[in-house]
Amino acid sequence: MHRTLVLSLLLTMATYAQLRTGTAESAGMSGTRLDRAAAILEGEVRSGKVGAASILVARRGQVVLHR
């Protein structure tokens, strides 16, 4: 399991390095909805239901959310 997590992290980092950053709106997405999704995930971590979490959303070659 640990190898899978490390491999997933490395693949994510490699993909992220090739993408540019932008706003949700410039990629045709709702910044408000993305913030809501991130807040839900962060709440799950704070409550202890999830040990740790990361979220990365990209569209049209732009990273619009990464926490």
Image: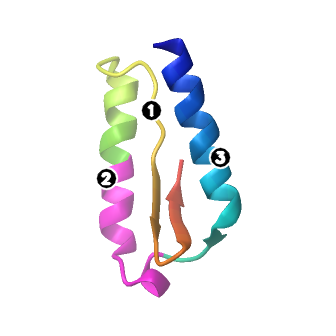
The residue under label 2 is 37
What amino acid type is highlighted by mark number 3?
A: Met
Residue 41 located left or right of residue 5 = left
Q: How is the image coloured?
A: rainbow
Instruction: Give the CA separation, mark 3 to mark 1.
Output: 15 Å
What amino acid type is highlighted by mark number 2?
A: Ala
Query: Where residue 53 sits in the image (x, y, percent)?
Result: 44, 32
Residue 54 against residue 24 in the figure, above or below: above
Query: Where residue 61 sits in the image (x, y, percent)?
Result: 54, 74
Q: Closer to the N terminus: mark 3 or mark 1?
A: 3
Quarter holding residue 27: bottom left
Q: Closer to the N terminus: mark 3 or mark 2?
A: 3
Q: Which residues are magenta?
A: 24-38
Q: Secondary structure at mark 2?
A: helix
The residue under label 1 is 53
Check if residue 22 falls in the magenta segment: no
Residue at image position (38%, 59%) is: 35
Check if residue 25 falls in the magenta segment: yes
Q: Secondary structure at mark 1?
A: loop
Query: Where residue 36 sits in the image (x, y, percent)?
Result: 31, 56
Mostly what secondary structure, the magenta segment?
helix
Residue 65 against residue 24 in the figure, above or below: above
Residue at image position (30%, 43%) is: 40
Q: Secondary structure at mark 3?
A: helix
What amino acid type is highlighted by mark number 1?
A: Ala
Residue 42 located left or right of residue 66 = left
Residue 45 against residue 3 in the figure, above or below: below
